[in-house]
Amino acid sequence: MDKKIIIIISAVAVVLLIALILGGYFYWINFKKSKTNNFSAAEDITNSATKGVLPSLGTNPLESKPDINPAEAANPIKDIKINPFE
């Protein structure tokens, strides 16, 4: 009876080991596919979301900013440059 129990336990262990190996293999294959699909999907979403919205990198939006600083016009001595250490 002892030999029969050992054979049954070892057969169940072998079947479980094979099932675990097959399950890990299929999980790894599906994980690899989903990883590559996520990057391409995210790139497609980014490209479609920013299509025609972003300004070109060659333009500077602050080139034509208005002069709204009142202190520049009110300072009468801004053109005087005297070095006190000479």
Image (tube, rainbow, N blue to C red):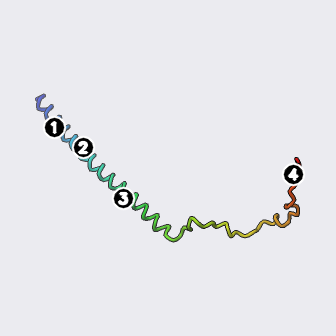
Amino acid on which the number 4 mark rests in the picture = Asn
Do the CB atoms of the residues marked 3 and 2 lie less than 8 Å apart? no
Quadrant hosting residue 13:
top left
Mark nearest the camera among 1 and 3 is: 3
> To which residue does mark 4 refer?
83
Tell me which label, 4 or 1, sits earlier in the chain: 1
Query: Mark on residue 21?
Result: 2
Q: Is label 4 or label 3 in front?
A: 4
Residue to which mark 1 is pinned: 11
Q: CA distance from mark 2 to mark 1?
A: 15 Å
Q: Position of residue 79 (x, y in %)?
A: 85, 61
CA gap between label 2 and label 4 equals 82 Å
Q: Is residue 64 left or right of residue 27?
A: right
Lower sequence index among marks 4 and 3: 3
Q: Residue at image x 17%, y 34%? A: 10
Q: Quadrant of residue 1?
A: top left
User: Measured from the top left, where is residue 15 in percent x and y?
Assistant: 18, 41
Question: In the displayed structure, does residue 74 sit left or right of residue 25?
Answer: right
Q: CA distance from mark 1 to mark 3?
A: 39 Å
Q: Is residue 55 left or right of residue 30?
A: right
Of mark 1 and mark 3, the one earlier in the sequence is 1
Q: Residue at x 58, y 66 (%)?
A: 58
Disc 4/disc 1 C-alpha distance (Å): 96 Å
The residue located at (39%, 58%) in the rendering is: 38
Q: Earlier in the sequence, mark 3 or mark 2?
A: 2
| Between marks 4 and 1 in the image, the one whose residue lies nearer the viewer | 4
Percent across and percent down for residue 51 are: 49, 69
Residues 75 and 34: in front is 75
**At label 1, which amino acid type do we have?**
Ala
Q: Determine the secondary structure under disc 1.
A: helix
Tell me the mark number nearer the camera, choosing from 2 and 4.
Answer: 4
Report the disc number at residue 37: 3
